[in-house]
Image (cartoon, helix red, strand yellow):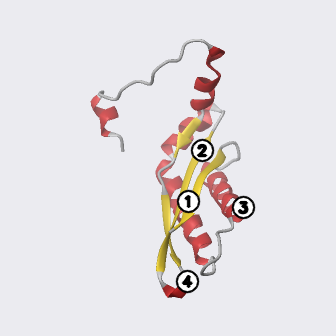
Amino acid sequence: MDRRALLGLKTRPLRVSGGGGGAAAAQSTYLAMPTITANVVRTGGRRGMMTVETGIDTPDAALRVRVAQSMPRLRAAFAVAVQQSANVIRPGAPPDVERLVAQLQAATNTVMGRPGARLLIGTVMLS
């Protein structure tokens, strides 16, 4: 939770002059999600961590408001999908990112009740 926004102290983004505002228009449809983590079994039976960075691109303004309001439900659904994906990774093998993206997009569509919010994946890391 961004407490500065509640206090009215949150800084405003800088405006870039010229260029037609293409980057500003594209940025306004993107909502960043907090990092999702899950436990994995590494080689030799040690425990590790799978970290996934995601965001959601929603061109529809009404759906974007609904996505912002549904962030806790989305985080919970993403945590379940990431943990399920981490459970099937064999020790020493890389994660199946395409399967993970499909699971996360399905979770997004389920929480939102309809398609329209597109999942964007940033980083998938095993440590």
Q: Identify residue type, mark 4.
A: Thr
Q: Could you give the CA–CA distance between mark 1 and mark 3, rounded to whole angstroms?
A: 15 Å
Q: Which residue is mark 1?
A: 78
Q: Which residue is mark 2?
A: 56
Left or right relative to 25: residue 69: left
From the viewer's perspective, is the residue at label 4 or at label 3 nearer?
Answer: 4
Q: Could you give the CA–CA distance between mark 2 and mark 1, rounded to whole angstroms?
A: 12 Å
Q: Please report whichever mark, 2 or 4, sits nearer to the chain's N-terminal start.
A: 4
Q: Identify residue type, mark 3.
A: Glu
Of residues 44 and 60, the one nearer the viewer is: 44
Q: Which residue is mark 4?
A: 43
Q: Identify residue type, mark 1.
A: Phe
Q: Residue furthest left?
A: 7
Mark 4 in CB contact with mark 3 (< 8 angstroms): no
Query: Which residue is at a point 48% across and 55% down the rendered structure image?
Result: 35
Residue 86, percent across and down? 58, 72
Query: Which residue is at a point 49% across and 42% down the rendered structure image?
Result: 69
Q: Please report whichever mark, 2 or 1, sits nearer to the chain's N-terminal start.
A: 2
Mark 2 in CB contact with mark 1 (< 8 angstroms): no
The kind of secondary structure element at disc 3 is: helix
Which numbered disc covers residue 98?
3
